[in-house]
Amino acid sequence: MGREGPGPHPTVSTAALTDAMGRLAAHRAHIIDLVSPTPGRTLYGTAVTIEFVPFRQDLFDARVHSFAGFFYKAIADGAAGKVLVLGNSGPKDFSLAGGTKLSRLQNHRLAGLLTDGRIRDFRELEKYDPVFYCGGETVKAGVTDVMPVAANVPVVIGEATVLPGDIVYADTGAGVIVPATLAAEAFQLAADIEREDASFLASIRHEDPDDIRVSPRGREV
């Protein structure tokens, strides 16, 4: 199926990774208010994308504007370990896909899916190996409300721009988008931040309130 994922699975928190990206880049990298049919599992992989727009009857062609067609375009250079990112500029209360369409992620060994749109069939998706994070669950299919129009183009998820090839990392805290060129540095810095924060726990445990009142520390912890 082509290239595998982006390397060994890191174990940092999305909070630490967000802090790391804040030190390395000025743009927004984090995505909040995500839910999952696979809670407690971390999503990690290289982004491939599909963009959805509001449905247009005069433009729609079922042979062209199909989820399957754009899915296979998105994974043309490899599927295993990839994260399918669905951008949606259309209505947010309809499903972009459900258990049947998303079974393709299972069949082709993708790492999972990220979107701020809604998906359906959580009960079915929780049985899959891929990890899913989205804007919520819904029950109505969106086939007459939104339509896919492009694969492997920049998309916007929760005010963060995602490019094909970016590293996607998400857990119950948030999603974080890391440019591939910054990935090694960002994850290492996130691990350093976690160790730094852990060292503050001991100092906080033993700090003297009177000393803090008189001589506030330079960094808030």
Image (cartoon, rainbow, N blue to C red):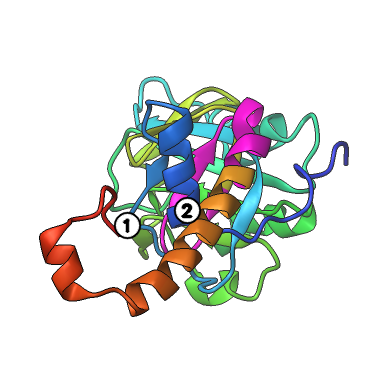
Residue drawn at x 50%, y 48% as measured from the top left: 17
Q: Is residue 169 left or right of residue 216?
A: right
Q: Which residue, given by chain and number where applicable, does mark 1 sit on? A: 33
Circles 2 and 1, Cβ within 8 Å, touching? The answer is: no
Q: Amino acid at mark 2?
A: Ala
Residue drawn at x 27%, y 42% as measured from the top left: 91
- Residue placed furthest toward the left: 213
Corner quadrant of residue 178: top right
Q: Residues within 10 Å of mark 2 (few under 14, many from 20)?
A: many
Task: Provide residue 26's location: percent of width, then percent of height.
Answer: 38, 26
Residue 65, placed above or below residue 189: above
Task: Identify which residue, 207 or 199, lies in the foreground.
Answer: 207
Task: Provide residue 95's location: percent of width, then percent of height.
Answer: 40, 53
Give the CA separation, mark 2 to mark 1: 17 Å
Task: Provide residue 38's location: percent of width, then percent of height.
Answer: 55, 71
Q: Amino acid at mark 1?
A: Asp
**Image quadrant for the N terminus?**
top right
Task: Identify which residue, 119 or 178, lies in the foreground.
Answer: 178
Residue 172 makes an appearance in the image: no
Residue 156 makes an appearance in the image: yes
Residue drawn at x 61%, y 45% as measured from the top left: 187
Which span is picked out in magenta?
169-187
**Image quadrant for the C terminus?**
bottom left
Task: Provide residue 120's location: percent of width, then percent of height.
Answer: 45, 63
Q: Using the image, tell me which numbered label, if any, was put on residue 16.
A: 2
